[in-house]
Amino acid sequence: MLPLRVWLGSSAPVPRLLGPGPHSLLAQLVGDVQTHLEEMERLRHSLLLAYPLLCGEGEGRRPRPSSRSLAEGAGKEPGSQAQGKDKFQLSMDVSGFSPAELMVRVDGRKLTVTGKQEKKTASEAGVCSHEYREIRRETLLPEDVNVEAVLCSLSQDGQLCIEAPHLALPAAEGRAVPIS
């Protein structure tokens, strides 16, 4: 293959790529991602601060401590979490599953909810139908939760409510330590 200078003619300059080089593009991309992550963290923090007001706690009322109020507070998400003063609460929609078809397991701080359901039907015409449903949801419990005292209940509307008390001493928050 001929060099670019010979191909274009010896007097023609070699064209340069337009725009920044690959290293500056990568740096720009990393900066953009970092900016988006910081904005998402600010929004998450704002939602955590607004949650009590949205639930009516800021008006002197205490919301009903049910799984339904937890699920409504989280919108359409599959599970919603709430940090109360005395306990941690988690709600998951498992409608269609019976307690016998569900299993909740705690390994360290990892909480796993699994459900398996199998239905077989046969019609008079000899047509067989086999339906199999399975769910699996995992979440990490906060460090200030007593994992030995996790309790579960299933409401009539199919909401699995998982509760655990906070430890006696809350986890210490990070702080800057001056250098002397």
Image (cartoon, rainbow, N blue to C red):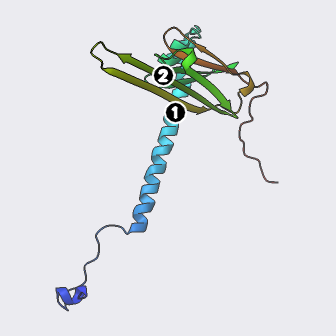
Q: Is residue 84 left or right of residue 80?
A: right
In space, the residues marked 1 and 2 are separated at their CA atoms by 35 Å
Return the residue nearer the eye: 165 or 63: 165
Question: SS at mark 2?
Answer: strand
Q: Say if 133 sits above or below 174 in the image.
A: above
Mark earlier in primary sequence (1, 2)? 1
Q: Amino acid at mark 1?
A: Arg
Extreme-left residue of the structure:
9
Mark 1: few/some/many CA within 10 Å (<14, 14-19, 20+) = few
Residue 77 visible to an observer of this rendering: no
Please give the residue where the numbered disc 2 appears in the rendered image. Answer: 117
Of badges 1 and 2, the one in the foreground is 2
Which numbered tag is attached to residue 44?
Answer: 1
**Quadrant assignment, res 29:** bottom left
For image coordinates 39% across by 62% down, the residue present is: 25
Q: Amino acid at mark 2?
A: Gln
Question: SS at mark 1?
Answer: helix
For image coordinates 45% across by 61% down, the residue present is: 27
Give the quarter of the figure containing the C terminus: bottom right
Residue 19 visible to an observer of this rendering: yes
